[in-house]
Image: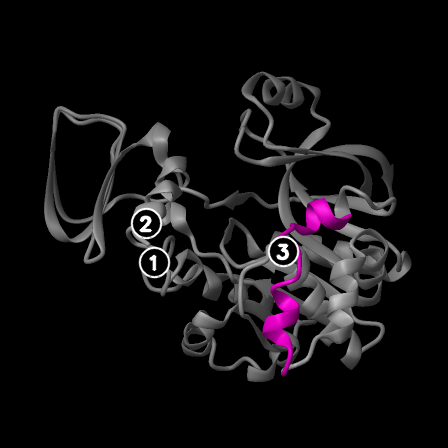
Amino acid sequence: MIYPVLMAGGVGTRFWPLSTPHRPKQFLPLIHPKKSMFQLTLENLLSWDRVNKQNIWVVTHQNFKSLVQKQAPYLNSSHCLLEPMMRNTAPCIGWAAKNIFEKDSEAIMVVLPSDNWIDNKKKLIQDLKSAVHFVEQNPLALVTFGTSPTYSATGYGYIEMGRREGTLFRVKKFTEKPHLRRAEQMLKTKRYLWNGGMFVWKAKTILQELKKHEPSIFEGLQKLNAKNLNSVYKKFPAISIDYAVMERSKNVYVQKASFQWTDIGSWEGLSSLRDSRAEHWIQLDSKNCFVDVPHKTVATVGVSDLIVVDTPHGLLICHKKETQRVKEISKFLR
């Protein structure tokens, strides 16, 4: 049986002032005018005939419980795992794997971020089918997804492809956010893919890998229950599944994606995917600006490469090259 797991616990600090601690970016309609990224991800999954609504799991922060219930009321409420504090992706994936394994010892997990943009859901499902089939034939395999880079990005992780095995490739090496010169070299080789942060594996396999490489997480998961959730969870290391397992395991494969993927990690990234939103935008000698001010008239005069975002929570005016620094604003708002 296939059990999709959506990771929906991030706070989206790079999308201030639209994203707030009470309504982070995955629950916002960043691309679609009405549907959130979380809802679009669910729609993609539910277009697959092997996915049952009742088998979908969500891992999120306890503050976002009502957002999940409001945006996806059809999900099984007992399958919404509420983290008491954020500990990155390894603990949250492990927690989901533990619960799923207890229900189905042969379960196959499809783990997806809830805030990525996929351009073609038919191709996504086609690639997921390929990965699931590979795991069915190779139950110890850990499958990740990579997309062909279109430019020398320094904000993404990279996967180096090794030898081909069936429709997938052995992973030779992971490289996290390289400097520009290195990214340019990697792009030329055509051996590297952008790391999409999506995974397919058996629940029992990822648990065994955690036991081997991060025993403190595995041991904590064995003790975890409703009564001790807070005390156990806070002892977990804040570590990603890539660092905890994928970069250490000998059984990692990559599915080269046939779809286009974008990690919408900043206002600049979003500006490349959709048009500005404004009630009325007056542009006088302005170039390459992005405006997200749906309920006001905006005028830009003699400026270029700016991001302008206005909400009841605040006003952001930022150069496009500095959008990664927006996360620093959260330090001043605590």
Distance between mark 3 and mark 1 Cα atoms: 21 Å
Q: What segment is highlighted magenta in the picture?
A: 227-245
Element marked by disc 3: helix
Decide: is 30 above or below 50. Answer: above
Say which quadrant the N terminus sits in: bottom right
Proximity of marks 1 and 2: CB atoms separated by less than 8 Å: yes
What residue is at 41 percent from the left and 42 percent from the top? 266
Q: Is residue 262 visible?
A: yes
Q: Quadrant of residue 301?
A: top left
Element marked by disc 1: loop
Distance between mark 2 and mark 3 Cα atoms: 22 Å
Element marked by disc 2: loop
* Residue 89 tag number: 3
* Residue 20 tag number: 1
Decide: is 197 above or below 160. Answer: below
Give left or right: position of 252 versus 226. Answer: right
Relative depth, front residue between 240 and 77: 240
Q: Amino acid at mark 3?
A: Thr
What residue is at 30 percent from the left and 46 percent from the top? 332
What residue is at 63 percent from the left and 23 percent from the top? 187
Q: Earlier in the sequence, mark 2 or mark 3?
A: 2
Decide: is 119 above or below 85. Answer: above
Q: Residue 136's spot in the image, x, y percent?
A: 86, 62
Q: Residue 243's spot in the image, x, y percent?
A: 70, 45
* Residue 16 tag number: 2
Local packing at callout 2 (Cα closer than 10 Å; few below 14, some 14-19, many 20+) is: many
